[in-house]
Structures are given as C-alpha cells and as structure tokens.
Image (cartoon, helix red, strand yellow):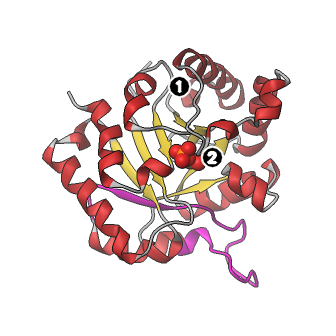
Amino acid sequence: MAAIKPLIAGNWKMNGLQASLAEIEAVRDGVSAHNLNHVVDVLFCLPTTLLAQATHMIKGTIQFGGQDCHAKISGAHTGDISAAMLVDVGATAVIVGHSERRADHNERSQDVLQKTKAAQSAGLTSIICIGETAGERAMNITEAVLKRQLCESVPKDATPENTIIAYEPVWAIGTGLTPTPEDVAQTHGFLREVLEMHLGLDVAQKIKLLYGGSVKPGNANSLMHLNNVNGALVGGASLKAQDFLGILAAFKQ
Ligand code: PGA
C-alpha cells in the first residue's frame, strides 16, 4: 500500500474570536521551524466567522476548512452556509456529519451524504465523521454502527482527493477517554475493509482515516503511528498552539 501523508486537522467547534487566530500563527511558525510540512498536512476547521480572515492572514503552510455545509447550492436557508461560500473564502475542506451535529441538529447519514455531495461538487474535501456512542459500544454493536454510518454517508464515487474519514467514538470526544491503541488499530483496519467493499480496493487504500476523540500531546505518539491511522481530528487540543504543536511533534523525524 502506498504511503499516505498524514493530516492533523483541528476542529475549533464553537470556539474562537478574531484574537484567537494568533494561536494558528504560532502553529504555522512551529510547523515552518521544524519543516513539518514535508511529513504532515495541517488543517484548521474554524467557525465560519473566522475563515476569511484566517485564509487571508495565514497562507500556504496551513489549510482551512468549515465545520458544516448545507446540501443545497443556495437559497432560503437562514443561518446556513453553502459549500461554495466556504470555497469563496478560501476553505479547501469541510467537516460533515460530526457527532455533535448528528446529535444537536438531528443529522442522519442520509443528510451527511447529501452534504458531502454538495461539498464535492463545490471542490471541497469532506471530512466525514462516524463513531459509536457509549451505549452502542456497551451493546457490542460498534462495527455494525460504523459500517452503516460509513456506507450511508460516503458517496459511491468518493475519491482520496475529495474524501477523508474521521473515526470519532462519541464517548471519547471531549472526555479525556480514548480507546486503546490496539482498539483503534483494529477499528481502523475494519473501516479500511468496509471502504474496500464500498469504494473498491484502489480508492479505499488511499483514503485518509483519521482518529478523533481526546487526542492530546501525551497520547499522539501512541495513536498516530498505528496501521491505518492517517492522522487525527483534534478538538480541545487544537485551541492552543502549544498543545497542537505537541501533537504535531509525533511526526518530528
Ligand atoms: P476532542 O474533540 O479532541 O476535544 O475530544 C474531537 C472532535 O470532536 O473532533
């Protein structure tokens, strides 16, 4: 299997004001100082209010993305953001189907599929999130849940260029809990197999599989070098440059 360049993506969620962009400038400086761009891609998915300023201020070393987009191109959808609007302010990616949106906005995998298609038509890379809840894990149905979410959310014509999968156990998000590295490796191996069935071997082997859920400087090294783990989606620890650079340190050579 060809080597996949890892991606560390920050997800600021509903955090950050204009002054907070200084943290990303500090990340950019750290990435440049250690030449990390050769070995890892860096992306920040920001609140929409910060995207235009961020892409204007910080060019090159760091990519930017949104955290959701509407399935329609434009129209009467008060408060929503289209994929083309994200592209217009310089975003190259968008998170779709994050568990917080699935829970807070009742988004189902069918909705995630439509949003992903809209993102792809606009030229964005979708970071499609899937993950089991604590209850589903306790019932031992994790693999069935993940398989269903993956097959229902990922378009059949997805490519490694326009699609990234983030496996985020819901019980690990923001809790400080993580699955063991063995569990993460096993689950990612399972997801790779499901992708192979869904998209064919060639495409599936090149798609980035990110792990997300309480990734921190202290556990990045043990999680980021596992088979079929091609990076991380990072919430809390993406808000401070020092923490985020601590995660990127896992890729220092
Ligand atoms: P966390 O969030 O790193 O704060 O657990 C991850 C995410 O929800 O993407």
Q: Is residue 21 above or below residue 231?
A: below
Q: Is residue 230 above or below residue 120?
A: above
Give the image location of residue 63, x and y in percent.
37, 57
Does the residue at mark 1 contact the one at mark 2 (Cβ under 8 Å)? Answer: no
Which image quarter holds the C terminus?
top left
Q: Is residue 152 visible?
A: yes
Q: Quadrant of residue 27?
A: bottom left
Q: Is residue 163 visible?
A: no
List the residue tagged with mark 2. 128
Q: What span is colored magenta in the figure?
A: 59-85
Which residue is pictured at 22% across the width and 47% down the height? 31
Q: Main secondary structure of the magenta part?
A: loop
Identify the amino acid type marked 2.
Ile
Which residue is pictured at 62% across the width and 74% down the height? 81
Name the foreground residue: 63 vs 30.
Answer: 30
Name the foreground residue: 57 vs 213.
Answer: 213
Q: Quadrant of residue 77?
A: bottom right
Which image quarter holds the N terminus?
top left
Q: Kindly identify which numbered label has been placed on residue 173.
A: none
**Farthest residue toward the front?**
176
Tell me the element at label 1: loop
**Farthest residue toward the right?**
139
List the residue tagged with mark 1. 205
Q: Mark 2 and ligand 1: say if the CB distance to the nearest ligand atom is below 8 Å.
A: no
Which residue is pictured at 44% across the width and 72% down the height? 51
Identify the amino acid type marked 1.
Gln
N-term-proximal mark, 1 vs 2? 2
Q: Is 107 left or right of 4, judged from the image as shown?
A: right
CA–CA distance between discs 1 and 2? 16 Å
Q: Is residue 92 above or below residue 243?
A: below
**Farthest residue toward the left?**
33
Q: Quadrant of residue 79?
A: bottom right
